[in-house]
Image (cartoon, helix red, strand yellow):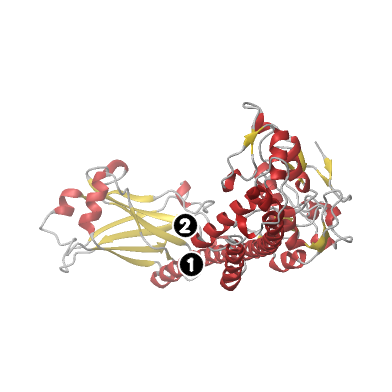
Amino acid sequence: MAERRRGGGHVSSFPDAEPRPAGFPLGICAGAPEPKYLCSHCQGVLRAALQAPCGHRYCSACLAWIVRNHKNPLCLSCKEEDPNSVDEETLLSVEKAFSDAAINKEISELSVRCEVPGCTWIGIMKALEGHKITCEHALIPCHAGCGQTVTRKELTEHSQQECNLSAVSTGKEECRFSRVGCLFKGIRKERQEHEKNATGMHLVLLLQHAKQLKGNQLPAVGGTDSCFKVAKALNGIFLSLQLPQALDVDAFPGVPLYEGESRWQALLRRKVLPLLDSKLQVFENIVSVLSKEMDASRQKIVAFRGQRGLDQDTIRGLELKIADLQRCLAQKEVALSNLQQKLLLSAEASYNGIFLWKITDIHQKCYESLTGKMRSLQSPAFYTARYGYKLCLRLHLNGEGKGKGTHVSLFLVLLRGEYDALLEWPFEHKITFMLLDQNNGDRLVSTFHTDPTSASSQRPVTDMNEACGCPQFLSLAKFQSVKFTYLKDGTLFLKCIVEPFL
């Protein structure tokens, strides 16, 4: 199914194989973003931009999605610019794309706004993810798991007044200060009344808890100096609440008593509770400061993570470039090796129709030929003249054709040469094979003429023609006999003379 891209203009023909990723929506930008900031696929603002070999940019997730879902993923922007220009550069590949660090940095500095309705936050792109974590207008699910979704700023009120998940089974709710030691439980109305009337007791529990925290661990934000200042302030508040003189009932003989009220209760109502209320306000201020410092630290952490993501993109791009360079280097090494081999063969080549072939390690080669591991040996190429016919010899140590298993077979093979178009065909020459005795004894000589009607004498249409020669060149018995020194120190010499047939 075709789909018009966001932003208009381009139409995607990619089939829907899996959910499509997308970049940042255009609506978050304070103004219309420049075209260089837009993904060539989703037309949103680039998210972790990658640049294809053709020069067009894609979100990293968009490019991976395209490659996964298409056998021949072509760059649509290239195709739209010129439908007939389809080459290797227009073929998309994650490995060939590289991270565009410059564009990513520019995008991270773009002015954007929060998309959440009612939120007025405006900042730069790299701070957007951090804002989303703390946005008060964002809808989030209830932490208690009741299934309702509320804005972040309404979550506390919902938990206190609307969420009844904790009272489903028992009908009773714990005091909100149970985490610091309060043991009260009751229905919601009783709990609210208790929390209203037990402010002093709750403050004492909170201060005791703060004192314990001060002794066990330091706050996570603000630095070491800030941690000691906060601990000292909390300790001072706690000590001020001890007030042994204030708890002495006889120290306040003039405190009036209500009906049914003890002097201790009167003292708590008139003297201690107001003091506790004032200390509670100080404590709340300290907690507010710590909360702001935590928010600031959270923003820094988010920014750091964003920068780390950009650095990782840069590293990944460099790794891909290194991999490309390594592949190119490997290809050049192979090409250089082939060139060196050609130069070596060229240096060994003969250009007068006479070729001497030295073959070493014969015993090992005979064993491999006998066991079938090696069928034949082929000599380097040689020529009848500088611009003449290109030839080579082929030796079967365990025989071939009529000589299979009984003789050594030797053949001449006509190769496709660089100057075949200038030569006369078919190939009509006199061929002489010699196996040289290494003690200056008798040579084994075999001579034959090429057959002009044979396929082996016609102009080669492949790399080499069929072989022609002597399938029964030398019997294996004579070859292995100690009476002859054709083979010495694991080496033998073969000579071929090619002469025009007159």
| Front-lying residue, 38 or 132 | 132
| Front-lying residue, 207 or 484 | 207
Q: Which mark is residue 415?
A: 2
Q: Tell me residue 49's x, y (percent).
A: 71, 59
Amino acid carrying label 2: it is Leu
Residue at image coords 64%, 31%: 172
Q: Is residue 447 visible?
A: yes
Amino acid carrying label 1: it is Glu
**SS for dot 1:** helix
Residue at image coords 40%, 67%: 353
The image quadrant where one finds the N terminus is: top right
**Quadrant of the image occupied by residue 38:** bottom right
Which residue is disc 1 drawn over?
333
| Front-lying residue, 30 or 493 | 30
Q: Residue furthest left?
A: 483
Residue at image coords 77%, 64%: 107
Q: Is residue 18 visible?
A: no
The image quadrant where one finds the C terminus is: bottom left
Residue at image coords 73%, 56%: 58
